Amino acid sequence: MSSALTVLSKPALGQRLLPVISLFLLSPVCAEYLIGYAESTNHPLEMLWGLAILGPLYGSVALLIREITRRMGRSWPTILLLATAFGLIQAGLIDQSLFNPHYGTDFEILYWDDERLPTWLGQLGISANLVFDFVGGHVIWSFAAPIAMVECCTPRIANRPWLGRTGVLLMVSLYLAAAAFVFDDHLRITGFMATKAHLVATVAFALLFGIVAFLVPARTAKQTGQIPAPWLVAIFVLAVLALHTLSSPDWVGVSTSVLVLVGSGVLLLRWSGRVGWKNSHVLAVAAAALLAYALISFVVQPPGGPAPAVKYAVNTVMLLGVIVLAAVAYRRLRTA
């Protein structure tokens, strides 16, 4: 997981095909299904069909972010900044959930109003809570945690490219097609289009984060210092993300969440620059992030009334899946 000064050659197709498929599918599952907020959680078959769109929308981006970072010999600061750029594009340009007051179904609009209005900035036409929630959610759960988890499952090729030229072109094509479909679908259903000022601002900030992603200096040497054991890191991250996810949507909750997330992020970056930071610590962070969503899903209610038993069955399957995936990654790291 550390940054490399030289880019290694691609592994054989047989070695990289499974991690490519795994990340392509894990990213949308973590982005849309793991927390259990959507009405589709009540309909497992609908969730499976949804991957036909969500896989290209999220999975292709996760693969492209990872591919760019590893090919350039860079590491997690670049991944996180690129994830922020794509999170802004997703929420600001594609589904325009940052700006659309009629986003979702009738039941979802009422839910999002509760999340939007307490921190609504009328002159800017955005909600501070939704900006932080949507973009931050994409950074952590749509891209960073799935990338880390799949790389921990394949530690021998974690710092090497997985896609060839054809694979990159395929991912770009799938993403553009899915983005166009989602954009057209939301436009057709809601008739909403963000203002030119919103669109220009979104593009400008996405470009800014993308540029900074390649300007941050790559780490060339580890520093000395104490680091908690991986299990302590996991508990710390689980508590931080649970606090973030369950925080109130008002200014007090958002301010507290921002301070806690930013502070813990700086702390994790400091720890990751020290000699004792290992892949097992990376796994602890990723597993805790997924576990936080999987556990909280049991208290999250999809719009439209009380959830049926099948919703909790889906939550249970997701939770067990996270545990199994973390166990597989831990075993792979131990035997690498």
Image (tube, rainbow, N blue to C red):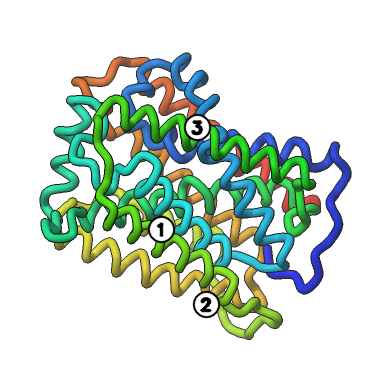
Residue that carries the numbered disc 2 in the rendered image: 270
The one nearer the camera, 209 or 336, is 209
Residue that carries the numbered disc 3 in the rendered image: 54
Residue drawn at (68%, 62%) of the image: 1
Give the mark, 1 or 3, whose residue is nearer the N terminus.
3
Residue drawn at (18%, 52%) of the image: 248
- Which is closer to the viewer, label 1 or label 3? 1
Q: How many marks?
A: 3
> CB atoms at circles 2 and 3 under 8 Å apart?
no
Give the mark, 2 or 3, whose residue is nearer the N terminus.
3
The one nearer the camera, 250 or 215, is 215
The one nearer the camera, 129 or 224, is 129
Q: Is residue 88 above or below residue 187?
A: below
Q: Secondary structure at mark 2?
A: helix
For the residues labelled 1 and 3, the Cα–Cα distance comes to 22 Å
Residue 334 visible at all: no
Give the amino acid type for the residue marked by disc 1 in the picture.
Answer: Val
Residue drawn at (40%, 68%) of the image: 264
Give the mark, 1 or 2, whose residue is nearer the N terminus.
1
Residue that carries the numbered disc 1 in the rendered image: 203
Q: Position of residue 217 (x, y in %)?
A: 61, 79
Q: Position of residue 243 (x, y in %)?
A: 30, 55
